[in-house]
Image: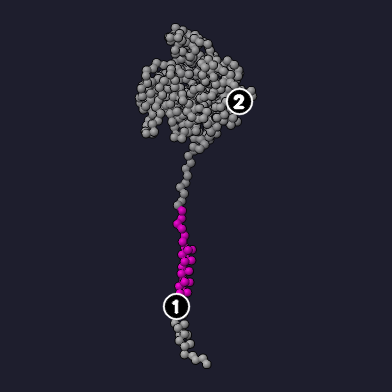
Amino acid sequence: MVLAVGANPAVAAAVPPPTVDPGRLPPNSAPVPPPTELRDPCTVTAPAADLAQTPTPQRALDLEAVWPLSTGRGQVVAVIDTGVERHSRLPGLIPGGDYVSSGDGTSDCDGHGTLVAGIIAATRSPETGFAGVAPDARILSIRQSSNIYREVGGRRDAEGQNARGVGNVGTLASAIRRAADLGATVVNISEVACIPAGSGDNPALGAAIDYASRVKDVVIVAAAGNLDSDTCRTSNPAPNPATPHANLWDSVTTIATPAWYDDQVLAVGSVNPDGSPSEFTLPGPWVDVAAPGTDITSLDPRRLQPSGVTDSTNGGPVQGTSFAAPYVAGTAALIRARYPELTARQVMDRIEATAHAPAAGWDPYVGHGVIDPFAAVTAAPGRAGPGTQSVELAIPAPAPPPDHRPRDVALAGAGGVAALLGLGLLASFPLRRRLQRAGGDTTIG
């Protein structure tokens, strides 16, 4: 899901991480949506082909190994999205408000938010192989955007459709503040506003992120963004092998927000089933980790059974960094349930430290690597994680010099014997000569 913003052609520029002014925090108030109406029928997804099969991302992350240790119980994960439909496998759904239309956040015509929520916290069922990452966590739903609704009297494109839909960075800021005030411990934002480098940041959004992360100690997870022809049109440059130490913040062309609030947001890229970066992932110096973003199965807002990988309304697969982010948000809920003493920053650091790092180290497509929920949950508190703990080793003492005394004694003894033998041999020469002369004067008859 992409939030529409005004944009000019992107040009590479030096882009420092955004600044934050806490004084620009949006007020703590209930959503007041504008007058809106549906422009299209609600999205329909195709049912999963094999309900009994465990989805590929779920197997890849080995969630079955994690659940005996943590299921996210006691955690509230806010889904700021297109709403989350009430569903039997989201029994703890909490209505958080609606910035799109009259409602409480538990309607989802777009289908996007329900898919995201299912990946995070769908309960386990003996009838299907699918379940959420943190199946005992609760979802707090805030409907903040929609591509199907439009503002009444709003601008239409040539085909009579509202090109922007409903939702902007300002309402996103208000939704983040509301999620934090309603008690969320994790916030998932599978929405991205792509703006050209040099366009500046949004003071209200930065203040809301700072408030949720620093003041309310909330883990904020956001999608890195998808490259496409309508929204995030220009990719940021990949690292140049000729300048391996170059600062990628100096060559940004497209800013993805809220992902670029790097110090307080865990930005998530997408990988394919083979672990390679998904071709649609928008790279950037703010990308922290990656998770599966293709071959997605999750809860269908129109039916009780999970939906498969096809969006039958748009005729394309359900994929994107939007669906990679909830795997990370669910992992954060698992960690917070097992280690409630950890701060939001410590949870984020743990997820990064236990990820499967790329061969060359951090990169702008997958960040520190693909997440490992089991490693993130089992790493000892306060430690970076299995395989990454630093231990001071004592410097070994130098080896003692070789002891040649036995050899020297043996050689000396052998030399002494040889000398005595030599002397004895030399002493026998005169005696032999005298005996030989005496023998010559004797006559034998």
Q: Quadrant of residue 228?
A: top left
Element class at badge 1: helix
- Which residue occupies 47% across, 77% down? 424
- Which residue occupies 43% across, 16% down? 4
**What percent of the width, then of the height, locates residue 158?**
43, 9
Toward the viewer: 140 or 129?
A: 129
Q: Earlier in the sequence, mark 1 or mark 2?
A: 2
Decide: few, some or many residues near mark 1? Use Cα within 10 Å; few <14, some 14-19, many ≥20. few
Rounded to the nearest whole Å, what is the CA distance between mark 1 and mark 2? Answer: 100 Å
Q: Is residue 442 shown above or below 347?
A: below
Toward the viewer: 358 or 295?
A: 295
Toward the viewer: 437 or 259?
A: 437
- Which residue occupies 37% across, 30% down? 247
Q: Is residue 4 shown above or below 385?
A: above
- Which residue occupies 46% across, 80% down? 428
Q: Which segment is the magenta one? A: 399-424
Residue denoted by label 1: 426
Residue 368 belongs to the span the image colors magenta: no
Asked whether the viewer can see residue 83, the reply is: no
Residue denoted by label 2: 53
- Tell which residue pokes out farthest to the bottom in this image: 445
